[in-house]
Image (cartoon, rainbow, N blue to C red):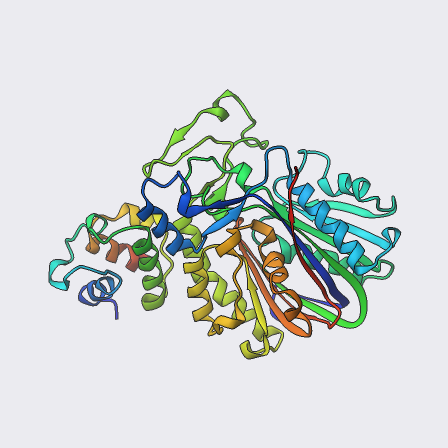
Amino acid sequence: MFIMEEFIKNFYEILDDVEIDSIDKDTDYKSLEDWDSMTKLMLIAMVHEKYEKQISGNDINQSITLEHLHSRIQSI
Amino acid sequence: MTKGILNIENVQLTGSVSCVPKSVVSNSENSLFSSPQEAVKFIELTGVEQKRHLQPGVLVSDLCYQAADLLIKKLAWQKDEIDVLIMVTQTPDYLIPNTAIILQDRLGLSKSTACFDIPLGCSGFVYGASVISSMLSAQGFKKGILLVGDSSTTLAHKEDKAVAPLFGDAGCATGFEFSEGKRLDFKFWTDGSGFKSIYIPDGGFRNRTSEKSLHITQDAEGNKRTPLNPVMNGTDVFSFGITQVPGQVKSFLKSIDKQIDEIDYFLFHQANKFMLEMIRKSLKLEKNQVPYSMTKFGNTSSASIPLTLSLLGDTVRNTRIGMCGFGIGLSIGCGFFEIGDEFVNEFIEYDAD
């Protein structure tokens, strides 16, 4: 199952100091205070573990919101 | 049989000597980082607390020379017994000829020695081991030395935070010998579509060195480099590592009918601790099965596997070793071999002064 709510929950789990209510599909996730080189790698690891997909640095750079990223991953 | 598998009969590793420069560079005091917090974060992510840097004018071939010279003495080999000398390096003394050829003369080896280089990086020890073992497995040759290492700290631009704090210098010499009943197994994997994940744009024949090659550019993160320095897309390398390496290792072990708990030590290329921990957990390897050298020596390119081995000292005697080198290429090499009870395992430091 690859639904948006589930994806947001999985993304939330890699963050440290963010409330789940403060992120949604329109969140510009790279602007979050928690976002750094470590979260970037954890995102790649999460997508591989939960969805068995390999995303690149370019996939992350090219997507602004979580919804963008979600649809990019779906298209891989 | 699984494709990409190579089984080599009647060859064993008889000893290994690793040589690092004496000069220590600590990342917690690295002026490249804008704050101590940034340094702490880097160390947490990569695991690299400190590494060794070659002094100006010293080459990786000097480290390999020291390592090979001691290896020959410790194994009590006669120099004219050595049939083949292979050097795996991406930082040769000259573009031509190969560095192994120059070292034949420096080491005083016989003129009948086969000498050549293999210009691979992170996966290079495994590929080099497969080539030298294949030569020794055929009729005729009895003894060979595999040299590996790079002077990565001299390649990287000093102000490139993605590369400079990660790499250290090391050179290793490993002895291989014809030995009936022994064997080594290998598996290989290559994806050339990822060649730009780590590469040096200029200086080869695609883009010859020109005035533009000296032009310094700055990326979005503020890292500086010229087209003669390596550029690394760390995110893509990480993505490749965690998605491809566990599957390759699993498929390799299955094809040689070995279980994870039948391996005493699994030596990985020392890329990044966060990445290696993910790979280790994915393969269900215990912490004590996966030794690290990157904490004190950084990413030492093709030398990382034998350097990690050397740091284990005599505890490697009578053990079963798995190994996986992966990275630049993109390239993966997996290997399995057993170490006997007379294995020579040494670690030395080199001070040019």
Residue at 44% in and 59% down = B273
The quarter in which the C terminus of chain B is drawn is: top right
Q: Is residue B125 above or below residue B284?
A: above
Q: Quadrant of residue B141?
A: bottom right
- Determine the residue located farthest toward the left in the rendered image: A21
- Determine the residue located farthest toward the front in the rendered image: B353
Q: Quadrant of residue B338?
A: bottom right
Q: Is residue B342 left or right of residue B294?
A: right
Where residue B194 sits in the image (x, y, percent)? 48, 48
Where residue B78 sits in the image (x, y, percent)? 87, 54
Q: Is residue B85 left or right of residue B128?
A: right
Foreground residue, B353 or A58? Answer: B353
Where residue B124 sits in the image (x, y, percent)? 62, 52
- Give the mark count: 0
Q: Is residue B251 visible?
A: yes
- Determine the residue located farthest toward the top in the rendered image: B211
Q: Is residue A38 above or below residue B181?
A: above
Where residue B332 sits in the image (x, y, percent)? 55, 57
The quarter in which the N terminus of chain B is drawn is: bottom right
Foreground residue, B166 or B344? Answer: B344
Residue at 63% in and 60% down = B310
Residue at 20% in and 51% down = A33
Q: Is residue B191 visible?
A: no
Residue at 73% in and 49% down = B86
Foreground residue, B339 or B259? Answer: B339
